[in-house]
Image (cartoon, rainbow, N blue to C red):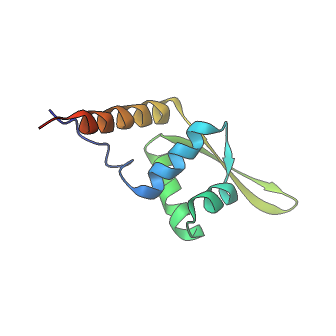
Amino acid sequence: MFKNLDPLLHSQLRLAVVSLLMAVEEAEFNYLKEKTGSTSGNLSVQISKLKEAGYIDVEKTFRDNFPLTTCKITTRGKEAFEGYVTALEGYIRQKD
């Protein structure tokens, strides 16, 4: 049967953020914004949701007196992503 898909990762933008973070050690907000084509406001909201779920860690610092937000995927986030991919593969492999 079909496994439930993680509703948090089923959002296109949140899935894109987690996918990007799976490939890099950490990423700055502007990098994620550029790669996803998102607006600052929407990306900020989605990052907050991922952080609340424990899927990513967010560090806020300053660089040259400008705010700098850096995101890093957590072990829980990696496990959730891998589970999501496995569930999708189950959907793809289903036969009539």
Q: Residue at x 36, y 37 (%)?
A: 84
Residue at 16% in and 35% down: 95
In percent of the image, x 80 and y 63: which residue is there? 66
Say which quadrant the C terminus sits in: top left
Q: Is residue 66 above or below residue 48?
A: below
| Image: 36 above or below 25 | below
- Please indicate whether residue 3 sits to the left or right of residue 25 in the image: left
- The answer to whether 15 is drawn above or below residue 42 in the figure is above
**89 or 6: nearer the eye?**
89
The single residue placed furthest to the front in the displayed view is 96
Q: Position of residue 22 (x, y in %)?
A: 56, 37
Specify the quadrant of the image occupied by residue 11. bottom left
Tell me where residue 49 appears, x and y as whole percent: 45, 53
- Name the outermost residue toward the right: 64
Q: Position of residue 10 (x, y in %)?
A: 35, 50
How far from the left and from the top, in percent, is residue 61? 75, 52
Task: Tell me: residue 52, above or below residue 93.
Answer: below
